[in-house]
Amino acid sequence: MALQEQMTLSQGEVWLMATRPKTIILSVAPVLLAGLLALDGTAPVHWLMLPAILISAASIQIATNLWNDAADASSGLDKAAERLGPPRVTSLGLLDVATVRRAAICFLLMAAASGLYLVYFGGLPILIIGAVGIVCAFGYSSGPYPISGSPFGEVFVILFFGIMSVMGSVFLLTGEWTWTSFWAGLYIGLPAASVLTINNHRDRVGDKEGGRRTLAIQLGPLKTKRLYTAMMLISCIGMIHIFNLIHHGTVSLVSLVVTALLAAYALAMPIRKLFLAEDHIGLNQCLVSTSMFQLVWVVAFSAILMLA
């Protein structure tokens, strides 16, 4: 970002940039999916839980983004002149590290406050999930073994931004732990993990020099692209599996058609963008398309439920 552009940004625009609003989709989409599963189920739904779940999930996501911004700048991995991804406020000098870290803590406190309300109704399981989520928000980019620099980042994202998010949300809304919510969490978590895969694929050279050992570094460019493609298409096909679980072994023509259209969209948009990308600009466009794919996935799933 040019110096002139930096000077024209208001304080509000700087903080909005710092929160990385497009990534909030990754925390909101699983909760919306849980709401669809609850709505289609037979158990009574406690809809008053939904706003608190959304606030908690979004707050943890923003806190993670802010802490990651400050941590990478402090470690020297995130240099504004060399950065390939979207601009970071700390490395650009728009905000100092201490201020960004304090903001991250504030969002974690907000997540904890809404989490207490959820724990009151959900009990010990929700307390454990919330506590682990807050610890991992710090440990994602900090500590002796940061998750973001390891080969296990994708697994972490699938587990916490997919499986646990959907299962925990469904439990809070209906009081039930179900295999359907487990599989739904897995399939919605795959695109979230794909976002991380692209991010690490784009930054693999600098990350390797900085001592990171991400999965993209371990696999190399071609295998990383194949992994991304597999995760995206399995996520699409998983929609049929969830419908099969909900409707006890049946598969409708609607579910097959919608799944085929979703897979075609994935191939034509984010997957195609990845294979055609020639530089970090193309990969950043793929990153946005992959984030948006989660919302498209949720909309497609809601269409299946309504039309089945």
Image (cartoon, grey):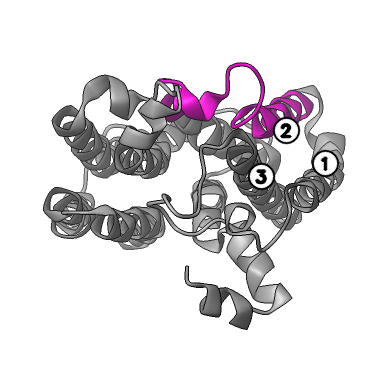
Of pointers 1 and 3, the one earlier in the residue sequence: 3
Front-lying residue, 173 or 269: 269
Of pointers 3 and 2, the one earlier in the residue sequence: 3
List the residue tagged with mark 3: 70
Residue type, numbered disc 3: Ala
- Left or right: 114 with respect to 93? right
Residue type, numbered disc 2: Ile
Of the 4 image quadrants, the one containing the C terminus is: bottom left
Mark pair 1, 3: CA separation: 21 Å
* Foreground tag (3 vs 2): 3
The residues colored magenta run: 126-155
Disc sitting over residue 134 in the figure: 2
Residue type, numbered disc 1: Ala
- Left or right: 180 with respect to 202? right
Which SS type dominates the magenta stretch? helix
Q: Residue at x 13, y 48 (%)?
A: 275
Of pointers 1 and 2, the one earlier in the residue sequence: 1
Res. 44 visible in picture: no
Instruction: Point out residue 210 in the picture as x, y percentages from the top left corner.
Output: 45, 28
Q: Residue at x 60, y 83 (%)?
A: 8
Q: Residue at x 70, y 49 (%)?
A: 53
